[in-house]
């Protein structure tokens, strides 16, 4: 919603730039999509490593939790 409001203000102030942004947005999104996919994959791998490292500590602490 905030992005749409900013676009409307830009459309009032400088409509050619707003139309250019509207046309360029899908192409920029497609260019940045692989980086987003890599980010999700790296986050998943780091989460698995973190869980593997902390698993023994969580198993040892489990019986003593109240």
Image (cartoon, rainbow, N blue to C red):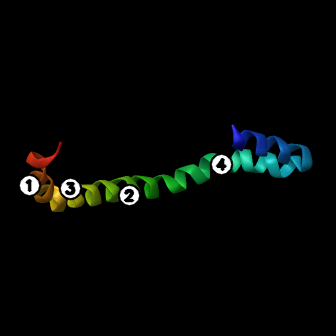
Asked if labels 3 and 4 touch by Cβ distance under 8 angstroms, the answer is: no
In terms of sequence position, does the residue under pointer 4 or pointer 2 come before the other? 4
Q: CA distance from mark 4 to mark 3?
A: 37 Å
In terms of sequence position, does the residue under pointer 3 or pointer 1 come before the other? 3
Where disc 4 sits, the SS reads helix
Where disc 1 sits, the SS reads helix
Q: CA distance from mark 1 to mark 2?
A: 34 Å
Q: CA distance from mark 3 to mark 1?
A: 14 Å
Q: Nearer the viewer, mark 4 or mark 3?
A: 3
Where disc 2 sits, the SS reads helix
Residue 65 point in image, percent of width and height: 16, 46
Asked if labels 1 and 4 touch by Cβ distance under 8 angstroms, the answer is: no
Asked if labels 2 and 1 touch by Cβ distance under 8 angstroms, the answer is: no
Hey, which residue is sitting farthest top in the picture?
A: 1
Q: Which mark is residue 60?
A: 1
The image quarter in which residue 19 lies: top right
Residue 52 point in image, percent of width and height: 16, 58
Residue assigned mark 3 = 51
Residue assigned mark 4 = 25
The image quarter in which residue 41 lies: bottom left
Q: Nearer the viewer, mark 1 or mark 2?
A: 1
Q: Which mark is residue 38?
A: 2
Relative placement, left or right, of 9 versus 22 is right
Q: Nearer the viewer, mark 3 or mark 2?
A: 3
Relative placement, left or right, of 54 versus 13 is left
In the image, 9 versus 25, the foreground residue is 9
């Amino acid at each position: 919603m905030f992005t749409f409001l900013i676009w409307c203000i830009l459309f009032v102030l400088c409509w050619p730039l707003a139309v250019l942004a509207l046309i360029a947005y899908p192409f920029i999104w497609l260019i940045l999509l692989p980086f987003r996919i890599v980010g999700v994959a790296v986050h998943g791998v780091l989460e698995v490593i973190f869980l593997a490292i902390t698993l023994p500590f969580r198993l040892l602490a489990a019986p003593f939790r109240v």
